[in-house]
Image: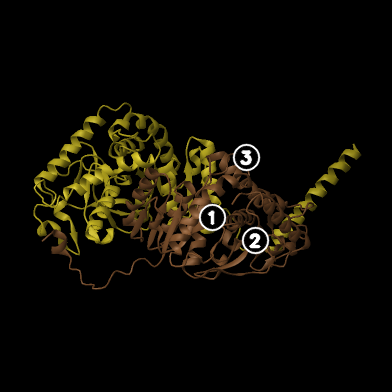
Amino acid sequence: MLITWWYLYLTVRSIAEKSLKMASILQKLITPLFSGPPEPPRNKVTVVGVGQVGMACAVSILLRELVDELALVDVMEDKLKGEMMDLQHGSLFLKTPKIVADKDYSVTANSRIVVVTAGVRQQEGESRLNLVQRNVNIFKHIIPQIVRYSPECIIIVVSNPVDVLTYVTWKLSGLPKHRVIGSGTNLDSARFRFLMADKLGIHASSFNGWILGEHGDTSVPVWSGTNVAGVNLQTLNPDIGTDSDEENWKETHKMVVDSAYEVIKLKGYTNWAIGLSVADLTESLIRNMNRIHPVSTMVQGMYGISDEVYLSLPCVLNNGGVASVVNMTLTEEEVAQLQASASTLWDIQRDLQDV
Amino acid sequence: MSTKEKLISHVMKEEPVGSRNKVTVVGVGMVGMASAVSILLKDLCDELALVDVMEDKLKGEAMDLQHGSLFLKTHRIVADKDYSVTANSKVVVVTAGARQQEGESRLNLVQRNVNIFKFIIPNIVKIIFKSCPLCGFPRHRVIGSGTNLDSARFRHLMGEKLHLHPSSCHGWIIGEHGDSSVPVWSGVNVAGVCLQGLNPKMGAEGDAENWKAVHKLVVDGAYEVIKLKGYTSWAIGMSVADLVESILKNLHKVHPVSTLVQGMHGVKDEVFLSVPCVLGNSGLTDVIQMTLKADEEKQLVKSAETLWGVQKELTL
């Protein structure tokens, strides 16, 4: 009995000595001034899905120094852990001190923004609308968990078909509509501005042009708004964007629509451009910038649209989400195109199971 | 008059100057593209060229990056399998070659990659040195990414242990980028406070805090990530962008990169190993002479011998 107590005493003493020694090394180096529970993150972003698009979004957000914490979620545990480690190994070069990942959504708690890239991707030649039901089933699992751990967040939906899935996310989340945003035609507009600017020999940011409506085959280029330094291109060339245009500017919009398919055919998927475009949206939201972006928002009641659909319109983004929508001056034909997109989307949406 | 002519009047009479900070990335695999994207997001170059043999993949990657031009400050992104597209580059990043399979050591890859390089390197040199084909390539312009990444991993792990940002944790890993890299424990410090002074057993066997395990995690780091996701890309990409930044901005920053170390620390063979080097726009101009312990020098010499053992078997 005494021997047991003696051994117990020796064990406790050696543990105490060890921890005292260990504590003293760190204690010798660092004197804490404040002890208490760590502060919650102020600018946390979660990326759901660590495929090519998710990781491109993650890396763009990290390299733009937008966040103090990044969380990654996916179902493929090894891939998830590997991606997290790879990013953590670069932390010397970053200003994001905490990068976490788990298949359990508790790791996403307190996110300001959640970027949803999960889901299956377009196969070569497959249109975005074909993906729909496959991705709805995945979202039924993801969205409620996001909201559970970050009830105040803003959700950016990237997965395709983005307009339909943003509607689905809005329904599944129960969040107010201004906090559910689809990446929409932010990327189409970026591609458009690049291609147009390239033809004119200027930087994309110096060319102003908006593509609205569906992110996909029926997107609407607003030719009446295209301008450089305030000089309206349609005034210089009234045929711009029509079939009778000798310079065939309409071709540029076609190239935008075809871009994704072309890149997919060449390299198997697209990721860099969409990643950069998501980081751009994240920046406006996190930094409360009130910048205008063409993103997918709930357009019921606008332009004669009576269905509950999400389409891209120029939205003012700040840290509350979509603060307001710009009222574009559209031609009758452009309004008709928006309405046609809305009906196509509504036809798909009303057949969806369990939304 | 076309719309463009109505809108824009060209007023410059001279030829356009062209790029001043061009970077080429050879190889558009995961590492090449991670390097390219890190370089682009850090706004380091005014022109980026991509080269590879796989033409479709190359074109697709270039298009994907170009589509992001609105968000970038690099106006020209070009790609071709022909090396003429790399002309006037200030820095060429070579990522081409076969990659480590799960469990495969880096040294095993060598002969496979030598054969690929026998095609790539003369093409680069021909374009960069078109006016002086007989000039040998000066050694201060050939830099291996070396242990810049190992040191970054070490500093990250050190930061986790001490609850500090990696940039406040100083530690240098030198020698071979690989299994026999050398952690210089005597230099590990925070705010100038030498940690080995606080814990004399640091890095040795009897160390209660087991810092030696930290170095082992660095060595195993790559293998673990490869096992989990199939390859590593982000960390090496960021580390490359870090080096490119020092070169293009002429920072004279010190990085642990791979250079010719013959004659240093008792190394007799013509091998490249990582030591702390000063990087600027002329390239690798100076080497910091580290004060190494006898066993650290011995490890370096041993790495050198291992490398020389592999190198002399190569058909160049």
What number is the disc on residue B172? 2
What number is the disc on residue A311? none
Distance between the alpha carbons at the discs numbered 3 and 2: 25 Å
Q: Residue type at mark 2?
A: Trp
**Residue A47 can be seen in this image:** yes
Characterize the local packing of mark 2: few (<14), some (14-19) or many (20 or more) Cα atoms within 10 angstroms.
many
Q: Percent x, y for residue A128?
A: 29, 35
Q: Chain of mark 3?
A: B
Q: Residue at x 38, y 45 (%)?
A: B55
Colour applied to chain A:
yellow
Q: Which residue is mark 1?
A: A91
Q: Chain of mark 2?
A: B
Q: Residue type at mark 1?
A: Ser
Distance between the alpha carbons at the discs numbered 3 and 1: 25 Å
Look at the numbered disc 1 and give the secondary structure of its residue.
helix
Characterize the local packing of mark 3: few (<14), some (14-19) or many (20 or more) Cα atoms within 10 angstroms.
few
Q: Residue type at mark 3?
A: Gly
Colour applied to chain B:
brown
Of A317 and B3, nearer the camera is B3
Q: Residue at x 54, y 41 (%)?
A: A81
